[in-house]
Image (tube, rainbow, N blue to C red):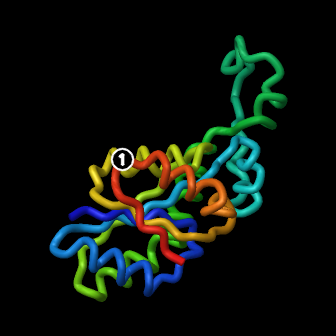
Amino acid sequence: MHVLVATDGSMNVDRAAAFAHALAGDGKTTVGTVIRVPRHLVQELRSKYGDAPRVTADIDAEYVGAPNVDAMMEKSFPGDDSLVTQYLGDKRVEHCGPIVEAIRLLGGEATSHVVEGDDIDDDILTMAKDHDVDVLVVGSHGHNAFQGLLGSTGARIVRRSEVPVLVLR
């Protein structure tokens, strides 16, 4: 059986690992998280990871057809995508890593994934479909993106899921 544990990092690690491992049996577990990364977050990323080096040109001809280069640089700079990728990787390790490690310590097979998205419940259901899971495990309460999980995101997941959903308290 293939189990997906959808987490925002607030789940009880040992409890989530125990249920996921028991459900998976000889199968595998995927631990996934959905992170909202709006473009204005790049400013926060710059403060955490530092500014990208300024782009310079030796001759004006390098900027032909690029009006007001400084204004464009304020919105975005080469490397934004790598900062987002680094940020997502950090969040994958932070949110999913402890559960993956706990499942492996129990003798199970576990991997982790992170998705950049805006619609948390839809992204979780898409992740479940993309990974061809048999059961989905979610927490009853969350923080950050999953805040008030059972009142909103969790309830929508339970109603819309094509596979059984285990809600952990």
Establish if 64 lies above or below 95: above
SS of the residue at dot 1? loop
Query: x and y percent of residue 169 in the render?
Result: 54, 78
Most extreme residue toward the left is 26
Classify residue 66 by image quadrant.
Answer: top right
Disc 1 residue type (three-letter): Glu
Picture residue at 78% right of the left edge, 26% below the top: 69
Instruction: Looking at the picture, tell me which residue is in the foreground, 37 or 141.
Output: 141
Picture residue at 49% right of the left edge, 74% below the top: 168
Establish if 157 lies above or below 11: above
Number of disc labels: 1
Picture residue at 69% right of the left edge, 48% below the top: 53
Provide the residue designation for mark 1. 162
Query: x and y percent of residue 153 in the render?
Result: 60, 54
Name the image quarter holding the N terminus.
bottom left
Query: x and y percent of residue 150 in the render?
Result: 60, 63
Instruction: Looking at the picture, tell me which residue is in the foreground, 28 or 137.
Output: 137
Establish if 136 lies above or below 10: above
Residue 48 vs residue 82: left or right?
right
Residue 66 vs residue 14: left or right?
right
Establish if 124 lies above or below 107: above
Classify residue 141 by image quadrant.
Answer: bottom right
Classify residue 68 by image quadrant.
Answer: top right
Query: x and y percent of residue 155 in the render?
Result: 57, 55
Residue 16 vs residue 35: left or right?
left
For disc 1, the neighbor class at 10 Å (few under 14, some 14 to 19, many from 20) is some
Picture residue at 77% right of the left edge, 29% below the top: 72
Instruction: Looking at the picture, tell me which residue is in the foreground, 97 or 56.
Output: 97
